[in-house]
Amino acid sequence: MFERSAHRECPSCALSIDAQADVCPYCGYDLPRTAASIKAAAVVFALLMLWPLFELARLIFR
Ligand SMILES: [Zn+2]
């Protein structure tokens, strides 16, 4: 049973650690906030990609 919202697996030692932890308390592995940062980057990237489409749509459908 995994509580994904509260814990995640350390990629180094494979132990269950706090999902909010920046460093693994067992092996000291530095845990980047990949999920959050990738999600944020994806949102920014999507906005950058979609913005010209919105502008194009405004030009076409005005
Ligand atoms: Zn670890």
Image (tube, rainbow, N blue to C red):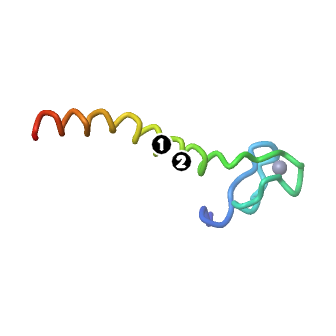
Do the residues under discs 2 and 1 have CB atoms within 8 angstroms? yes
Q: Residue furthest left?
A: 61
Is 25 on the left or on the right of 50, as rendered? right
Q: Position of residue 53 (x, y in %)?
A: 26, 34
Q: Which label was assigned to residue 44?
A: 1
Task: Classify residue 56 as left or right of residue 61.
Answer: right
Q: Secondary structure at mark 1?
A: helix
User: Residue 32 or 10: which is nearer the viewer?
Assistant: 32
The vertical placement of 20 against 13, above or below, is below
Q: CA distance from mark 2 to mark 1?
A: 6 Å
Q: Amino acid at mark 1?
A: Val
> In the drawing, what numbered circle is on residue 26?
none
Q: Residue at x 71, y 53 (%)?
A: 9
Residue 1 in view in this figure: no
Above-or-below relation of 53 to 9: above
User: Which quadrant holds residue 38?
Assistant: top right
The one of 51 and 12 positioned closer to us in this rendering: 51
Q: Residue at x 53, y 47 (%)?
A: 39
Q: Which image quadrant: the C terminus? A: top left
Q: Residue at x 75, y 49 (%)?
A: 10
Q: Which mark is residue 40?
A: 2
